[in-house]
Image (cartoon, rainbow, N blue to C red):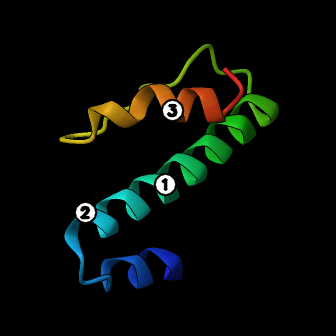
């Protein structure tokens, strides 16, 4: 989460938003991949309030 704090310090708003989105796609893509490997869960409910456009890239990054 240190990386996220660094990203929040970026002054330029469009750049900050793009970098945070990129970070979240990587972070949650890895999370979902690990969840698939270590559990027998039938699925996972993702909520991205005001970031709904990130759901498809996160699923793609997770290999699903």
> Secondary structure beneath disc 3?
helix
Q: Give the residue at the far top of this rendering.
A: 42
Q: Position of residue 40 (x, y in %)?
A: 73, 21
- Near mark 3 (Cα within 10 A), the count class, few <14, some 14-19 or many ≥20, is some
Q: Earlier in the sequence, mark 3 or mark 1?
A: 1
Query: How far apart are labels 3 and 1 at the CA level?
Result: 9 Å
What number is the disc on residue 11?
A: none
56 and 12: which is toward the camera: 12
54 and 41: which is toward the camera: 54
Image side of residue 57 versus residue 41, left or right = left
Whether 17 is drawn above or below 61: the answer is below
Q: Earlier in the sequence, mark 2 or mark 1?
A: 2
Q: Position of residue 55 (x, y in %)?
A: 41, 30
Instruction: Give the residue number, with chain letter if any, for mark 2.
Output: 14
Instruction: Give the residue number, with chain letter if any, for mark 1.
Output: 22
> Secondary structure beneath disc 1?
helix
Q: Position of residue 11 (x, y in %)?
A: 24, 84
Query: How far apart are labels 2 and 1 at the CA level?
Result: 12 Å
The residue shown at (18%, 41%) is 50
The image quadrant of residue 6 is: bottom left
- Near mark 2 (Cα within 10 A), the count class, few <14, some 14-19 or many ≥20, is few
Q: Are marks 2 and 3 in contact (CB under 8 Å)?
A: no
The residue shown at (66%, 20%) is 64
Instruction: Give the residue number, with chain letter if any, for mark 3.
Output: 57
> Secondary structure beneath disc 2?
helix
The image quadrant of residue 46 is: top left
């Amino acid at each position: 989460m240190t990386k996220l704090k660094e990203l929040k310090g970026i002054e330029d708003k469009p750049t900050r938003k793009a970098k945070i989105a990129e970070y979240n796609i990587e972070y949650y893509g890895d999370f979902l991949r690990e969840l698939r490997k270590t559990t027998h869960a039938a699925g996972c409910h993702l909520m991205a309030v005001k970031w709904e456009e990130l759901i498809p890239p996160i699923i793609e990054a997770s290999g699903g």
